[in-house]
Amino acid sequence: MKFCKVLIILMSIMTAAPLRHEIIFIGGETIVGRVANIGEDTLRFQPGDSDDEQDILLDSILYVHNNAGKLFYVSKKLRKFVDRARGRGGAITMIDGKRIPYVRLDEELFMYTPKLVYFTSDTSRRQAIDLLEVHSVRIDHTLSEYAVKKGALAGTGLTVLRFLFNFKALKELFNFSKVFNTAWALYPDLVTHTPVITIGWLVYDYFKGERKLILNPPESARVTLRE
């Protein structure tokens, strides 16, 4: 009997306190209200201080969550950044300003209680932080390794394409004399173009590559979800 009373009280509290949603925009700005539905390109949203619904482009949103720790939408930008950061070093800045250097990052973007998992050294235990407590993540110079691989692959791929364009039919690939002569003629280009493209990719990544992502506004500017 007592259990039934407790259950009824809990259900009434849940009914009286509907879930609210918070949209985190790219750049860290937030708005609070209710998500009506999520379409292919837009999200229908009702701000907490208005009765009118509005459409928001998904391209401007980083992710959406509610006050129960559940993710409703995660953008490709967030997933792509986490994929690039995974396994590399950097620093996490919390919403309270605390800075946590790490040597390797992982993630657990589950629908409930999403977390960033990190290691402070190669021998340390894994540690986890609630995604909603993270202000930003910055990847360190180890990301340059990724740029080197991309540049090397691009340079090698360009040379391979030039090699294949010298053959007009598949049967010519069985002409070992032509294959050898063509490869030998392109070898100087391979050893020249690949380093140049790799260095160019490194320079581009250093100035234009995305190394930092803001996940939440700082605590002083954070919007608190109210029941």
Image (spheres, rainbow, N blue to C red):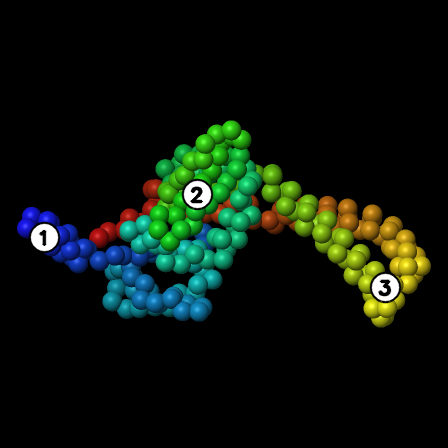
> Which is more toward the observer, 225 or 13?
13
Amino acid found under the numbered disc labelled 3: Leu
Residue that mark 3 sits on: 173
Residue at 31%, 66% (x, y): give it.
Answer: 36
> Comparing marks 2 and 3, which lies closer to the viewer?
3
Amino acid found under the numbered disc labelled 2: Leu
Whole-percent x, y for residue 97 in the image:
40, 36
Few, some or many residues within 10 Å of mark 1 (<14, 14–19, 20+): few
Q: Earlier in the sequence, mark 3 or mark 1?
A: 1
Using the image, tell me which numbered label, if any, was put on residue 101: none
Residue that mark 1 sits on: 4
Amino acid found under the numbered disc labelled 1: Cys
Residue at 28%, 68% (x, y): give it.
Answer: 52
Please say whether residue 135 is visible from this viewpoint.
Answer: no
Residue 14 in the figure: left or right of residue 195? left
Residue that mark 2 sits on: 116
